[in-house]
Image: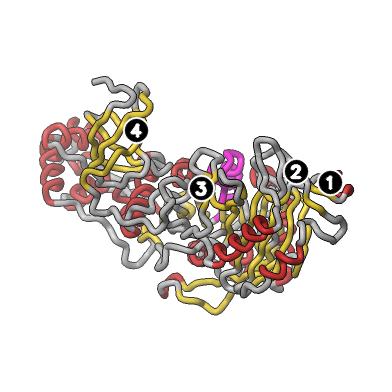
Amino acid sequence: MSYEKNQVLTVEIVDITSEGEGIGKINGYPFFVKDTVIGDQAEIRVTRVKKNYAYARLEKVLTPSPFRVDAKCAFHRQCGGCQIQSMSYERQLEFKESRVRNHLIRIGGFEPELIDQIMEPIVGMEEPFYYRNKAQYPIGRDKEGNPIAGFYAGRTHTIIPNTDCSLGAEENKEILEIILSYMKVNHVSAYDEVNGKGLIRHVLIRKGFSSGEIMVCIVINVSNKDKKAGSGKGNKLQDSGGEYLPVQKKLIEVLIRIQGMKSISVSINSEKTNVIMGKEVHTIWGDEVIQDTIHVRDVKNNFADSGYGITFTISPLSFYQVNPVQTEKLYSLALSYAALTGRETVWDLYCGIGTISLFLAKDAMQVYGVEIIPQAIEDARKNAVNNGICNAQFFVGKAEEVLPEKYEKEGISADVIVVDPPRKGCDEACIVTMLKMKPERIVYVSCDSATLARDLKALCEGGYELRRVRAVDMFPQTVHVETVVQLSQRKPDDVIEVDLDLNELDITASETKATYQELKQYVLEKHGLKVSNLYIAQVKQKCGLDMRLNYNPPKSENPKQVKCPKDKEDAIMDALKHFKMV
């Protein structure tokens, strides 16, 4: 059946894409529909038709999903930030956990039973709102010429006016309304990205959730020529530590009344670009930086505070995880998976400002961090000094270049390697070097489970095995999820070899042909059941036939193992009889 633009159809939403669009199918043909929830019966209007899929707009929800809830934010449909805010938080967690599992199976090629055995429950939030410690608001004007602040609508540069984002810190609303009022009263212009004119482009707000310290940085459209001339697009300015904003003191006087205000600055960006921050930052009140502390959590005790923390210095340009509550859990899991005893040399690749590195340093003999951004490494070194940490050393460069050089030319080895790469995953050269170095354990922290699965497949083909997997919900109300994985080196004794006398077993020609794949195929064709290698191994073991472990034995004392269901056990037994193996 063919479909046409503007055609109205009825579908049930059965899944969600990585972009947060609902997926509905008619006769196997998928439709991608924004603003829908898994389980919705929806009336949709086709907007674009492709050979193998189509896009559609939600016209109305005919029967709401049992997982549909009233969204907290009135602008969630227009704004591109919260793709799944209309889905209950419990179902969001289930969706994210299932997505990680499916990627490991489908892309990584791991057996479902293995993943179910080693995958631990997703780590969610008690309060999945107001968790972001950083927000960047574009500034513009409405049709009446009034200044507005908010977020861009999805895939556009149209500002949706909203000063009360339900993901940001609660102080953000008051800060934005003070700045907008100041602009209106003093006739301060908003930036127009079409003609490049106007003064205020963005407002950056950062808050230390542990310290309570707040930073405001106003991005302004001022060139060096404007500063020297004493005017900026029609607004009077003074250079060299003076006023970068018209009647600057009036704005400062109101902002500093907000509890926790620690730093107010301007960032100069006169380029026609989508990059928000400029390279030049000037502090106009208070300190240049704020501080915040990330605490180590006791993973075995429901993430209770261990009493130990690392304090970080944060500038307007610093990279710092935006959800501090979940960051503590994520990095504590990474530390737990590293299983350090104090004797290990640890490499932290893609280390940023050293957040994971400094967590690891307290339990390691030596930590080396690698990051491509020079400013981040400078911050990492300062953070190490400020926390009295002497066993952490940081290098600027690409992980795939620094790691081979330090290993092959300088002989620096690794007992444990931690990687926290960008969404594209690890570079191939980086994976090759890790395999050459043969650390006892690799801890992989991922923000994209698809590239994670790809990289895990390569690492396991190179001699490693999955031990533990756990997803962490760093970004509630969105489709994004972080994952922590522990891999350990596969040892020669992980497989039990047994010498067999084929004459004693009286093996026939038919027996030697009955591979695991043939047994699976027989069961599927005759009984309509899909069975795994693990299930076959369990049944063969019951019959005294399994002479080699099919899976690497877990090292925990009480490992969980999925039992073969009775119907599948009977089907496998029938296959063994068919091939005269029993």
Identify which amino acid the numbered label 4 is placed on. Answer: Ala
Give percent across and percent down for residue 209: 56, 70
Q: Under tag 1, what secondary structure? A: helix
Give the CA separation, mark 3 to mark 4.
Answer: 22 Å
For disc 3, the neighbor class at 10 Å (few under 14, some 14 to 19, many from 20) is many
Q: Distance from label 2 to label 4 (Cα)? A: 39 Å
Of residue 357 and residue 158, the one placed in the foreground of this image is 158
Q: Which residue is mark 2?
A: 270
Q: Residues within 10 Å of mark 2 (few under 14, many from 20)?
A: some
Decide which of 148, 281 is in the foreground and name it: 148
In space, the residues marked 3 and 2 are separated at their CA atoms by 23 Å
Question: Horizontally, is 46 left or right of 268 in the view?
Answer: left
Q: Is residue 178 magenta?
A: no
Q: Which residue is mark 1?
A: 226
Q: Amino acid at mark 1?
A: Asp
Horizontal and vertical percent position of residue 47? 37, 29
* Mark nearer the N terminus (2 vs 1): 1
Q: Is residue 553 left or right of residue 447?
A: left
> Is residue 538 at all visible to an observer of this figure?
yes
Q: Which residue is mark 4?
A: 56
Q: Of callouts 2 and 4, which one flags the residue occurring earlier in the amino acid sequence?
A: 4
Q: Is residue 310 left or right of residue 566?
A: right
Residue at the (54%, 71%) spot, across then down:
296
Looking at the picture, which amino acid does disc 3 mark?
A: Ile
Mark 4 or mark 1, earlier in chain: 4
Quickly name the residue at label 3.
Answer: 160
Q: Tags 4 and 1 in contact by the CB under 8 Å rule?
A: no
x, y percent for residue 248: 76, 62
